[in-house]
Image (spheres, rainbow, N blue to C red):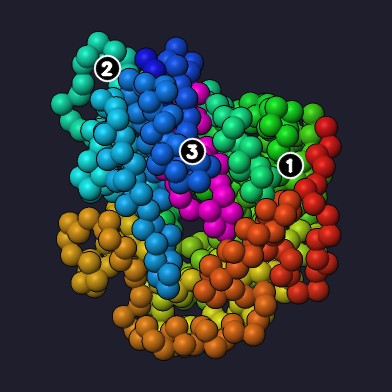
Amino acid sequence: MKVLLISSNIASTPYSVYPLGLSMVAASLHQAGHEVRQFDFLASGRSMETLLARVKEFSPQAIGISIRNIDNVNLLNEQRYIDAVSDIVQGLKRVSPAKIILGGSGFSILPEAILRVTGADFGIVGEGEKLFVDFLDNAAKDIYPSEKILRSRSHLLDRQIPSAFYDREIMNFYLQSGNVASLQTKRGCIHSCAYCSYPVLEGRQLRPRRPELVVDDIRNLLDEHNAKYIFFTDSLFNDDEGHYLSVLKEMKKRRLTVPWTAFFKPQGLTKEIIFLMKETGLKAVEIGADAACDITLRKMGKSFTFADIAACNDLFAECGVATAHYFMFGCPGETQDTTLEGVRNILSLKKTVSFIFMGIRILPDTPLAKLAEKEKIISAGQDLLEPVYYLSPLLERQWLEETLTEAFREVRHCVFPPDILDNTLAFLHKLGYSGSLWEMLIPGGSRRNSRAGKAVK
């Protein structure tokens, strides 16, 4: 069948992110013999006219729409993304009789509500690589499921997780917006962070891809797409089972070095490991600290202390690797005392950049949602499509916002609200600078004077 896959994402801050999940589904459909084309709404300049012209020219028999995020999870500057999806669906229905199938991580969080408000025909919850192939095989026989929402009953393992079918035209857009290319080494998350939807979306079992296939993908991004910077999109790169080390060793074995970044937890790292990462091109790390003192870290389900966060930060700094931290205030158990302690802790971190959020977006089926229901912040069965944020009932919102604003107002390397640098980073990417540009804010660090780094092949 002829299938058009559409990335509906319209968010471009702090930098544009290639629609990796869409391209992995495209790979499965292509391997199954379907004629697949990909369209990126952001890369088209959010042009409905361009999208509908592509539909008329291609005449797809089925249309898939990937939803990356529901909103921007920023209490102080809320932006909804589902309205754009609804507009896309309605535009498509005006020009095409093809069935419209929704998917992606954003859809999987709130499938019933999103299917209802957008008016699409079907939706796929979870990994779409196999389910979409099955759907199309049946659709070719004019057989459609009685249920509008399809749910995967098992997770893909090993070679079942495909290499992405990167679209050259779409990739060129993202490379011009920071030279960052996305790549996944594993799926799943074994941790139990109170607010996080990763275990809900990907399961609690780690499912690594074979290191040689991951490195093949890196080589493809360098040779075929001229990527200059790799972003590993795993929920956490440095997993406890050491799968990430196998990827690094395979890169070293094949003498493959390219600037890269990923999300890390502040545990289990040594100088030897960091030097191995630097040999393969590690330039910067993003650390998911989330809370800023031991009380709120425990309430958020973290297995580490703030001392662990500081030690990890110092270790990376000593090894010459730029770091960024993400902290949320208003967590369960947050009081005025923990807020002030958290501010002091953040300010004590050296040679790093911290992005500070206020409030936590409540997502279904998370421990935070259950707590919020118990505390009457949300009601039982509330669909949460309209953003609701958790703020500790032990705090007043105005006090918290004023306290954080005053605490970080003159601190260049502490960013609050977290989106105040978005336009600056986007402008630098347009000038040709690549990667995680926040390291320019690190105290005592040298400002980057060069453009995109050169990969060693």
Say which residue label 2 marks.
139
SS for dot 2:
helix
Q: Are marks 2 and 1 in contact (CB under 8 Å)?
A: no
Does the magenta run of residues contain 16? yes
Of labels 2 and 1, earlier in sequence is: 2
Identity of the residue drawn at 31% across and 45% down: 87
Q: Nearer the viewer, residue 194 or 151?
A: 151
Q: Nearer the viewer, residue 257 or 227?
A: 227
Of labels 1 and 3, earlier in sequence is: 3
Residue 30 vertical position relative to residue 418 in the rendered view, above or below: above
Give residue 377's quadrant in the image.
bottom left
What amino acid does circle 3 point to? Asp
Mark 2, Cα crowd under 10 Å, few <14 / some 14-19 / many 20+, is: some
Image position, residue 197 (x, y; %) = 39, 52
Left or right of 89? Residue 246 is right
Q: Are marks 1 and 3 in contact (CB under 8 Å)?
A: no
Residue 420 vertical position relative to residue 256 in the rendered view, above or below: below
In space, the residues marked 1 and 3 are separated at their CA atoms by: 21 Å
- The disc placed on residue 40 is 3
In space, the residues marked 2 and 1 are separated at their CA atoms by: 40 Å
Left or right of 45? Residue 415 is right
Image position, residue 450 (x, y; %) = 83, 55
Q: Quadrant of the C terminus?
A: top right
- The disc placed on residue 228 is 1
